[in-house]
Amino acid sequence: MDCVEAIARLWEYLDDELAPTDSEALRAHLSLCRSYCRSLHAFDRAFLHCLARARAAAPVAPAALLLRVQEHLQQPPA
């Protein structure tokens, strides 16, 4: 796997959505790559960790926000 493919498939990897062989190929690439891939992977993992912590601190969105989102989703496309 090269850097272009690794970066394109990184979110699938982080979301555990890759087939085992693809996941292993990406993991192997990350272990050897000294380019942008490794730092991007670290940044994206840290982002997901922060997101999980924020979600744990406030597991339910405020009612007003939920209502606004639902109303927006029910509007026909412009």
Image (tube, rainbow, N blue to C red):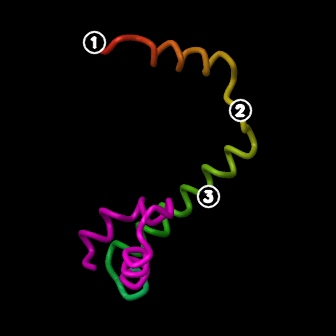
In the rendered image, residue 70 lying in the magenta stretch gets the answer no
Vertical order, 39 against 28 (above or below): above
Give how far apart the Cα atoms at labels 1 and 2 are. Answer: 29 Å
Q: Amino acid at mark 3?
A: His
Predominant SS of the magenta segment: helix
Where residue 51 appears, as percent x and y from the top left, is: 60, 49
* Picture quadrant of residue 9: bottom left
Q: Which residues are magenta?
A: 1-29
**Residue 27 within the segment the image draws in magenta:** yes
Nearer the observer, disc 2 or disc 3? 2
The residue under label 2 is which amino acid type? Val
- Looking at this view, is 16 or 49 the one in front? 16
Q: In terms of secondary structure, where does tag 3 sit? A: helix
Callout 1: 10 Å neighbours few (<14), some, many (20+)?
Answer: few
Q: Position of residue 66 (x, y in %)?
A: 61, 21
Element on which disc 2 rests = loop
Of labels 2 and 3, earlier in sequence is: 3
Q: Earlier in the sequence, mark 1 or mark 2?
A: 2
Instruction: Name the residue that disc number 3 marks.
Output: 49
Task: Say whether disc 3 or disc 1 marks the residue closer to the N-terminus.
Answer: 3
User: In the picture provided, is 63 more to the left or to the right than 9?
Assistant: right
